Amino acid sequence: MHEIHRENRIVSRSERPVHPQPHQTGLTQQAKDTVLRYLGRRGQAVPPQLDALVEECLGEIRSLQPRHTYRIFDLERTPLQDKPGTSQDEADPHQDEPTPETLFLRNTQVTLFGQGIGRHLKGCRRAVLLAVTLGVDADNLIRRREHTDMTRALVLDACATQQIESACDAIEQHVCREALSNGLTATSRYSPGYGDLPLDIQPRLLAALDAERKIGLTCTQNLILLPRKSVTAIIGLGENLNHGRKHQRCDLCGLKETCPYGI
């Protein structure tokens, strides 16, 4: 697989635990507010017992070290009308209108369909593939609690979601800093399932990252990541980009008007 040139200081990383800053995963009000939002408690008074439970569960989840891997690939673009055997009417079954071009990650089996990812990676010459997981310990912890205390299990699940998102934020910020140090701009992360980017690219993303061997991350036939508290994402790299970081990721989602969990 083609990776970024040696003289560029952005390097591929794998298997390393994520160490977000304390304000990202600590017992802060911001973290607790995020967990409460996932629990559907946005803007509501929080009973003292629930507040204490959230803090306890955050402490439990903090003991789990996220693992991640990422690699950097060159982007290739092919106009859809030039792709052999593809017509404009049937080029992409995942969207109502075909994109003007198809994006490929060089020397992989990854093809990026969808107008949303096309806009997100506009002007990008490279793309970072990223995978992060809390590991099987998070799944096991939540599953054990489901048999003894369902309320605690639900809170643990929300805390684990907050932890994995914080880990992704930390890695994204690292990529952005490294990009800037090399005269590049990074977009925000964009995951399968955002907009019209189909989930069925998950197996190819994981294969390109060798994620099963490196961090134990796999995908079921139903396209569910295992361990469950895991994320894959794509970050674009280019020069003088003026898009891709202006909006929250929720703005990319077609369910943003009705979702109770959005920002």
Image: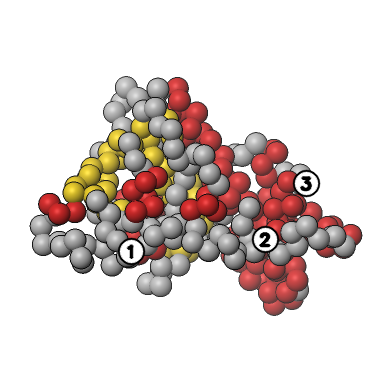
Residue 172 seen anywhere in this rendered image of the structure: no
x, y (%) of residue 116? 39, 52
Residue picked out by circle 1? 95
Q: Which numbered disc, 2 or 1, marks the residue closer to the eye? A: 1
Between residues 48 and 69, which one lies in front from this camera angle? 48
Q: Secondary structure at mark 1?
A: loop
Label 2 to label 3, Cα distance in Å? Answer: 14 Å
Label 3 to label 1, Cα distance in Å? Answer: 40 Å
Residue 81 disc label: none
Furthest residue toward bottom? 147
Residue 29 disc label: 3
Which amino acid type is shown beneath numbered disc 1?
Gln
Q: Work out whether mark 2 precedes mark 3 in sequence or the reverse, and give the earlier one.
A: 3
Q: Work out whether mark 3 precedes mark 1 in sequence or the reverse, and give the earlier one.
A: 3
Q: Secondary structure at mark 3?
A: helix
Which amino acid type is shown beneath numbered disc 3?
Gln
Q: Work out whether mark 2 precedes mark 1 in sequence or the reverse, and give the earlier one.
A: 2
Of the 4 image quadrants, the one containing the N terminus is top left
Other residues around mark 1 within 10 Å, as few (<14) / some (14–19) / many (≥20): some
Q: Secondary structure at mark 2?
A: helix
x, y (%) of residue 57? 74, 58
Indicate left or right for 162 with 248 as reference: right
Furthest residue toward left? 84
Which amino acid type is shown beneath numbered disc 2?
Tyr
Within the image, what quadrant is residue 106 found in? Answer: top left
Name the residue: 33% across, 56% down. 114
Residue 23 seen anywhere in this rendered image of the structure: yes
Residue picked out by circle 2? 38
Indicate left or right for 121 with 170 as reference: left
Label 2 to label 1, Cα distance in Å? Answer: 29 Å
